[in-house]
Image: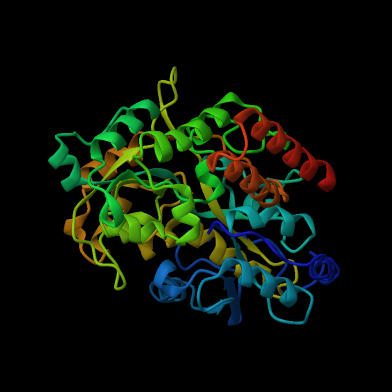
């Protein structure tokens, strides 16, 4: 999910040419629907059509085998086929395949895109603008969905799953240390918890927290801001000089090498540590992570859950009254080259409203979704629901305020990954913090400049 887009310029250029050929004037069902797709049994198609969903999300993750039949039952004129772009759910390989499909005569109807891969493909014309469909459906976008999906002023997709961040905590370890499940805490208190939860020495040492080597962790405290909460500001320029980024890097280094309450960075990269293994094998008591981990907290076939997981909001910044978290949606749109745009839109609208909840695996970007009900659905569908502290989970989801979430710039992944080498030099004590921030700012600014 935190994977870098690696599609070639050639593929994207070809995709632009092909998608231009499949614009509004082409296709057998290009007119907008007369009624809302959320209304069961409503559709304007008079002949049976077959549409495909092109996605990287496997059935194990998205539960398409439960969702698609439900849609077809209430939309008998539309048959839906799953086009899994990569059997392992690899988003990088999936986006490469998607670009090749866009540059060929392969059928594309519904396209689901990861968080940082949407704007680039909307920008080259791969997706159909949806304003006319929304207008004839008779709803206001901002009243139905939690995030803005506009690219260059147009809506090319609706948000499907919506990822928020929180902290997972081993409840047994909290009880052993006499610590309550946090409900209102700061990053300083997070560090204090990590120290109190650290235990032992050597290969079996239990760390208070695990901070992975994704670039998201280098910006953890930025994620607690209501706005400008990534490496890029909302205007698309570098956010590296925000003092909170500096404070976060200093926090990581202190926890790893002074407090020794988090796994050392060289161990993470040299041993290729996996965050699931560290947490579920009881080698770390706390794990800041995204909400896709809710269902996994009940265990998986690969890693069974042997303890109860509690949840807490991302810690607050000093002076903030709310617990914020960035929201990172996936996007679902209609291919501009589809021959059945209306039918494709019918599914997109249905799935991004009531349909996604049927799968019971992820949280929704639909404003009318019942979060507590969805928590119950996700927990009950997990491998062992008894290993999930539902009370703390509901509290966390209810009391986490979504931070500002503009559509990521098409160079967001490039900017994010440019941070890694400089942050690593600082954490590994090969570069001072001021030089690190200066270099990060320059690298991000160069990415912005080169993409303008």
Q: Nearer the viewer, residue 277 or 308?
A: 277
| Colour style of the rendered protein structure | rainbow
Q: Position of residue 249 (x, y in %)?
A: 53, 35
**Residue 37 shown left or right of residue 231 in the figure:** left
Q: Nearer the viewer, residue 182 or 142?
A: 182
**Residue 186 shown left or right of residue 232 in the figure:** left
Quadrant position of the C terminus in the picture: top right
Q: State the residue lying farthest toward the top.
A: 319
Q: Position of residue 67 (x, y in %)?
A: 42, 70
**Residue 213 shown left or right of residue 335 in the figure:** left
Tell me if residue 259 comes above or below residue 65 in the rendering: above
Q: Residue at x 29, y 68 (%)?
A: 303
Q: Residue at x 62, y 72 (%)?
A: 93
Quarter of the figure with residue 169: top left
Q: Position of residue 193 (x, y in %)?
A: 28, 34
**In this orientation, does residue 239 appear?**
no
Q: Nearer the viewer, residue 116 or 17?
A: 116
């Amino acid at each position: 999910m935190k994977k870098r887009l690696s599609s070639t310029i050639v593929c994207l250029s070809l995709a632009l040419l092909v998608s231009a050929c499949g614009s509004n004037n082409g296709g057998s069902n290009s007119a907008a629907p007369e009624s809302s797709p959320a209304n069961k049994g409503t559709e304007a198609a008079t002949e049976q059509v077959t549409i495909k969903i092109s996605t990287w999300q496997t059935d194990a993750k998205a539960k398409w085998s439960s969702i698609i039949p439900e849609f077809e039952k209430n939309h008998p004129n539309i048959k839906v086929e799953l086009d899994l772009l990569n059997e392992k759910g690899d988003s990088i390989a999936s986006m490469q395949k998607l670009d090749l499909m866009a540059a060929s005569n392969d059928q594309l109807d519904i396209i689901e895109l990861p968080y940082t891969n949407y704007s680039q493909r909307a920008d080259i014309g791969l997706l159909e603008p949806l304003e006319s469909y929304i207008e004839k459906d008779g709803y206001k976008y901002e009243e139905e969905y939690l995030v803005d999906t506009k690219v260059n002023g147009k809506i090319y997709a609706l948000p499907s799953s919506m990822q928020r961040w929180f902290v997972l905590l081993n409840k047994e370890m909290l009880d052993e240390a006499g610590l309550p499940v946090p409900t209102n805490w700061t990053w300083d208190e997070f560090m204090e918890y990590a120290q109190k939860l650290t235990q032992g020495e050597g290969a079996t040492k239990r760390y208070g927290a695990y901070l992975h080597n994704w670039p998201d962790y280098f910006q953890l405290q930025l994620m607690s801001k209501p706005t400008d909460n990534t490496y890029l500001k909302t205007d698309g320029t570098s956010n590296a000089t925000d003092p909170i980024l500096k404070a976060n890097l200093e926090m990581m280094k202190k926890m790893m090498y002074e407090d020794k309450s988090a796994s050392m960075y060289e161990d993470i990269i040299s041993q290729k540590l996996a965050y699931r293994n560290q947490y579920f094998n009881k080698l770390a008591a706390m794990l800041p992570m995204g909400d896709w981990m809710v269902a996994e907290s009940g265990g998986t076939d690969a890693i069974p859950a042997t303890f109860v997981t509690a949840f807490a909001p991302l810690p607050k910044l000093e002076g903030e009254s709310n617990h914020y978290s960035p929201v990172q949606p996936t996007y679902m749109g209609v291919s501009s080259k589809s021959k059945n745009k209306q039918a494709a839109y019918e599914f997109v609208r249905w799935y991004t409203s009531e349909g996604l909840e049927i799968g019971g695996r992820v949280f929704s970007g639909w404003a009318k979704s019942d979060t507590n009900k969805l928590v119950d659905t996700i927990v009950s569908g997990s491998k062992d629901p008894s290993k999930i502290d539902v009370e703390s989970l509901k509290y966390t989801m209810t009391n986490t305020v979504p931070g500002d979430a503009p559509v990521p710039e098409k160079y967001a992944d490039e900017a994010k990954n440019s941070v890694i080498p400089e942050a690593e030099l600082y954490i590994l004590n090969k570069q001072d913090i001021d030089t690190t921030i200066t270099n990060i700012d320059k690298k991000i600014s160069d990415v912005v400049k080169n993409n303008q």
